[in-house]
Image (tube, rainbow, N blue to C red):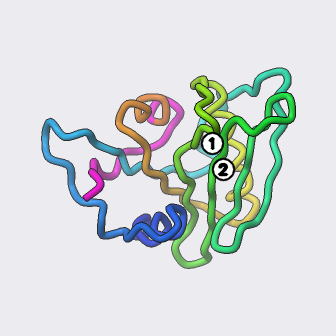
Amino acid sequence: MQSWREHFTLLSDGEPGESWRPAADGNDGWMVLEAAPQDVTRTGSLPAEGVLSQAPLGDYDVIELSVFAKPAARIRWRYDDEEGGAISEVLPVGGVEIAASTRAALVEAALDELWQEGGETVWTVVPEAQAADYLAAGWQQRERVTRG
């Protein structure tokens, strides 16, 4: 199933899904992961001063983390009745370093929203360096890809 490509064309503001191709050994890779939202182990935590807010932005919604009223990170998500759901990688804002537990909290917030929308399957594409955290939380690897 290649539905993740259609989702990521929209989540990346128009980067064609076809630009993702199988990764060759030795290339910097990205992992295509799939999970049922309710099966992902919840391990995330926000900074004590962190606040999440959400906004619909046309083809997708954004959940943003602010710390002391300054944006620090965001994640995009979308749901389609036919194709299921997808979340983007967690994107830092303004060069802020994002801790793994904070990244997990943003992913979990997006999964909760997708579950409420009816999403039973969720896709994501994350840098290979972050994939171990997702796999440990219950995500399943589907492909290793690279951007073309």
What's drawn in magenta, residue-wise?
A: 135-148
For the residue marked with disc 1, what is the amino acid?
Answer: Val
Q: Position of residue 46 (x, y in %)?
A: 75, 27
Give residue 22's quadrant in the image: bottom left
Relative depth, front residue between 89 and 140 = 89
Looking at the image, can residue 1 be seen?
no
State the residue lying farthest toward the bottom.
Answer: 82
Hey, which quadrant is residue 100 in on the image?
A: top right
Q: What is the x, y in percent for residue 13?
A: 52, 67
Q: Is residue 5 magenta?
A: no
Q: State the residue at coordinates (85%, 24%).
A: 49
How far apart in space, not on screen, are marks 2 and 1 (Cα)?
6 Å
Task: Give the number of the disc on residue 77.
Answer: none
Residue 2 image point, x, y percent? 36, 69
* Mark 1, other Cα within 10 Å: few <14 / some 14–19 / many ≥20: many
Which residue is denoted by mark 1 in the rendering?
Answer: 107
Q: Is residue 114 visible to us here? A: yes
Disc marking residue 111: 2
Which amino acid type corresponds to the residue marked 2 in the rendered image? Leu
Q: Quadrant of the N terminus?
A: bottom left
Residue in view at x 67 percent, y 29 percent: 44
Q: Are marks 2 and 1 in contact (CB under 8 Å)?
A: yes
Taking the image as shown, residue 41 lies to the left or right of residue 55, namely left
Q: Quadrant of the C terminus?
A: bottom left
Frontmost of labels 2 and 1 is 1
- SS type, badge 2: helix
Reply yes or no: does residue 139 show up in magenta. yes
Q: Residues within 10 Å of mark 2 (few under 14, many from 20)?
A: many
Give me the residue at 43% from left, 50% from top.
125
